[in-house]
Every structure is written in C-alpha cells, then in structure tokens.
Image: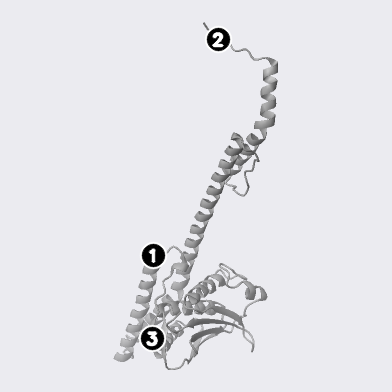
Amino acid sequence: MVSVCVYSDHDAGVCFLFYRKRLKKPFTILEGAVDRIGRKDLDFTVSYASEDEMGRLCASFEEMRKSLEENQKEMWKLVEDQKQLNAAFAHDLRTPLTVIRGYSDFLVRYLPKGTISQEKLKDTLGLLAEQCGRLERFSGTMKSLRSVEEIPFHPVRKKSSEIAARILGMVDALNMAKEVRICYRNQMKDQKLYLDEDLFLEVLDNLLSNANRYAESHVEILTETEGDILYLFVSDDGPGFSEDALLNASHLYFSEGTKEEHFGIGLNLSAILCRKHGGDVSYTNCISGNGAVVSASFRIRKEI
C-alpha cells in the first residue's frame, strides 16, 4: 500500500507564512554574508536577534566571520612585516656596500702604483674585513627574523675612541666613493660605552643613506655624550624637510617628490633600533639655512 500525502492550499499558506515570518530574514542575511565573504569582504556583522535555531545559526556564522577576519588581519600583518623586513634589509646594505666599494676603488687605484704603505694596506684590508663581517652578521640575523622588531639587542662595553675610529673609517671610505663630502666631528668624552655597536652602526648607515641622497655637496656627522646618553647627529646641505615631511617622515614608506626611495624606511627603522637602546630619533631643519638634521640617541649605561 502506498501512502500519499496531500497538501491543501491552507497548508501551503501556512508554510509560506512560516517562511516569510521566520526564515526569509535570516536566509537573506546569510545569503548576503556568503556573497560578501566570497568577495573577500569581511567588514560587516552577521546579526539576527533571535534565540531559535536560525538565530543560533547566524551567531555561529558571525563567529566564523570573526575568525576569518582575524586570520586575514594576521596574514596581512605577516605580509607587511616581511615587506618591511625586506625593505630594511635592502636599505641597510647600501652604506656598507658603498664603504666596501670605496676601499676597493682605493686599492685598485693606488696598489699597482706601489704608493700604499704596508701599514695603510693592512688597515684598509682590516676595515674591509670589518664591513664584510658586519654584512655577514646582518644577513645571518635577518634570515631568522619575522619583523624588524625582532632585531636582537646585544650591548657590550666599548671605548668611545673605538666607536669614533670605526665611524672615521667608514667616512674615509665613503669619501673615496665621492658621492658627497662627509665630515666627522667627535665630541664624545673619553669613556666606556655600554653599546650595541652593530645596532648603532645600522642607525648611522640609515641616516647617512638618507643624507647622501638629499645632500647637495656635503654631510656632517657629530657624536657627543651627555650623562648616560650618546647622541648621533647627521646633517646635510640639501633642501631640508618640507612641512609634510616634518610631520610624516618617520612613517613607514613615506616618500616625497620624485625620489624613488623613501624617508620612512631609514627613519622608521632607526627609531625602532634606537628605542631598543633606550633612545629615539628626532629630525628638523638646520637653523642656519638649507639642510636637514637628524638626531639619534642611545642610552649607554648598563641598566637599559
């Protein structure tokens, strides 16, 4: 025997009313949510104020949307961190490579002529080895990092005279490359500094890289100590910071004019590194005329 169910017009009307009153709204909400998620648009909320099965279904859908949104934000943060790390890596290679090029050009030019003393040759090769060592340490460190905030901080006791000699060696090599003329004035007291030398030199590299790009003819470096703070000043004779740059130059990837590079990479990274060292970065224009001045500070006591 076969049972046959027969629905009357009354039953169909009841079903339609049930759908219209209880199902149409949540179905419409869910359909819209599926469409927006399909378009990778998660900036919305699934909201249906009911405690029945459809209300619980919409609430579960909202939890899924939140989870997708959090995952998307985390993914974009990882992508942005990697982008920033890659930009920082490329930016920080500029000055050490220019130093190496300067010393190499010097050796190529004068070594065949026999005009370099053995002492000068030994010093030059030693400085080349130091820069290569810095690049090796830097590249080895960057390979294991996920963001610039993870750059390690390892301060040790250093003589101020050793830091000054390292800066002077870099300046000599950069001047050999003849991009712009760089002068260095050392006003540090003769003392021991509790300093992460690689971190300090990375900041100097970044500030020099920016200054060299915008300088007309010369850049000046000044180091001095005051209390437990080491100050590094880098100034140039370029056009200086515009009003917009004074407000935004340290923002990541900020750029101005037709320059293909960005203020923000160097200044932003330098600020992060200085804060690891208990200091910070500030910038302004020269009081006496054209040019920009960037100041980086480092706390040099042991308790940072």
Mark 1: secondary structure: helix
Q: Describe residue 2's horizontal placement relative to residue 190 as left or right.
A: right
Query: Cα distance, mark 1 to mark 2?
Result: 73 Å
Query: Total label count?
Result: 3
Q: Nearer the viewer, residue 139 or 239?
A: 139
Q: Nearer the viewer, residue 303 or 146?
A: 303
> Residue 240 in the image: x percent, y percent?
62, 80
Q: Describe residue 144's horizontal placement relative to residue 58 as left or right.
A: left
Q: Nearer the viewer, residue 223 or 18?
A: 18
Query: Cα distance, mark 3 to mark 2?
Result: 96 Å
Give the amino acid at mark 3.
Lys
Give the amino acid at mark 1.
Lys
Do the residues bearing badges 1 and 2 touch, measured as CB atoms within 8 Å? no
Up/down of 140 relative to 287, above or below: above
Q: Quadrant of residue 140?
A: bottom left
Query: Which residue is identified by label 3?
Result: 158
Measuring 58% from the left and 10% from the top, which residue is drawn there?
Answer: 4
Q: Residue 250 bears which disc, if any?
A: none
Give the amino acid at mark 2.
Ser
Measuring 53% from the left and 85% from the top, which residue is drawn there?
Answer: 233
Of the two numbered discs 1 and 3 in the rendering, the one whose residue sits closer to the viewer:
3
Q: Residues within 10 Å of mark 2 (few under 14, many from 20)?
A: few
Mark 2: secondary structure: loop
Of the two numbered discs 3 and 2 in the rendering, the one whose residue sits closer to the viewer:
2
Q: Residues within 10 Å of mark 1 (few under 14, many from 20)?
A: few
Query: Cα distance, mark 1 to mark 3?
Result: 27 Å
Up/down of 29 relative to 137, above or below: above
Query: Which residue is identified by label 2?
Result: 3
Measuring 41% from the left and 71% from the top, which residue is drawn there?
Answer: 152
Do the residues bearing badges 3 and 2 touch, measured as CB atoms within 8 Å? no
